[in-house]
Image (spheres, rainbow, N blue to C red):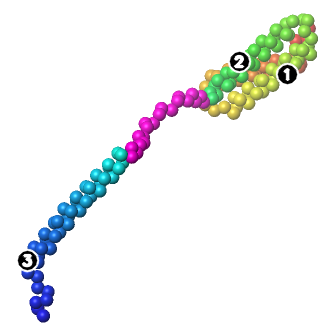
Amino acid sequence: MGNINQVDNNTHQFVHKNRKTNKAGSDNTFKQTFGEVLGNMESSKIETLQPGGLKELPQQNFQFPDPSGAISDKTENLVELLELYASKLKDKSISLKEVDSVLKEVGKEAQALLEKIENSSGVDEKMKNIANQVAVFANTEQIKFQRGDYLS
């Protein structure tokens, strides 16, 4: 019974040689298969997609609202209304009712400017002071007109 599992040197060499030939055969099989696949790809002219580069995005002109600019615009508008009011007040041919309608518009603009000043942050303090002075001046003119200071 001891002879059943005996392996002699010849058997070992036979197994070792078969392994080498199997490896060599599998390498050739892979090369042949890979070569056939490449040949089929070339013959069928499969189009390969080339990834395109990223295109440059067009420039966006983002403009953030400038709180100083809005206050400046409202202040300028109010000054123009005050100039209109002054020119109508000087003209004796214009009735006080017409002057009053301009002055009401001045009052609305002054109130809107004061609210804008209070609700705005990040605005230059000098700009706030100028706008505040113009609004206060407009309100003072409205009070003077209502009180009758310009009647003669």
Q: Residues within 10 Å of mark 1 (few under 14, many from 20)?
A: few
Between the C-alphas of marks 2 and 1, the distance is 17 Å
CA neighbours of label 3 inside 10 A, class few (<14), some (14 to 19), many (20+): few
Residue drawn at the location 55% of the way across and 30% of the way down? 60
Q: Is residue 12 above or below residue 137?
A: below
- Give the residue at mark 1: 104
The residue range painted magenta reads: 44-64
Q: Quadrant of the N terminus?
A: bottom left
Which mark's residue is nearer the viewer, 1 or 3? Answer: 3
Helix, strand or loop at label 1? It is helix
Residue at (88%, 17%) from the top-left corner? Answer: 100
Q: Earlier in the sequence, mark 1 or mark 3?
A: 3
Residue 100 visible in the picture: yes
Residue 97 spot, x, y in % from top left? 92, 16
Total count of labels: 3
Q: Which residue is mark 2?
A: 76
Q: Nearer the viewer, mark 3 or mark 2?
A: 3
List x then y, in percent, for residue 21. Answer: 17, 65
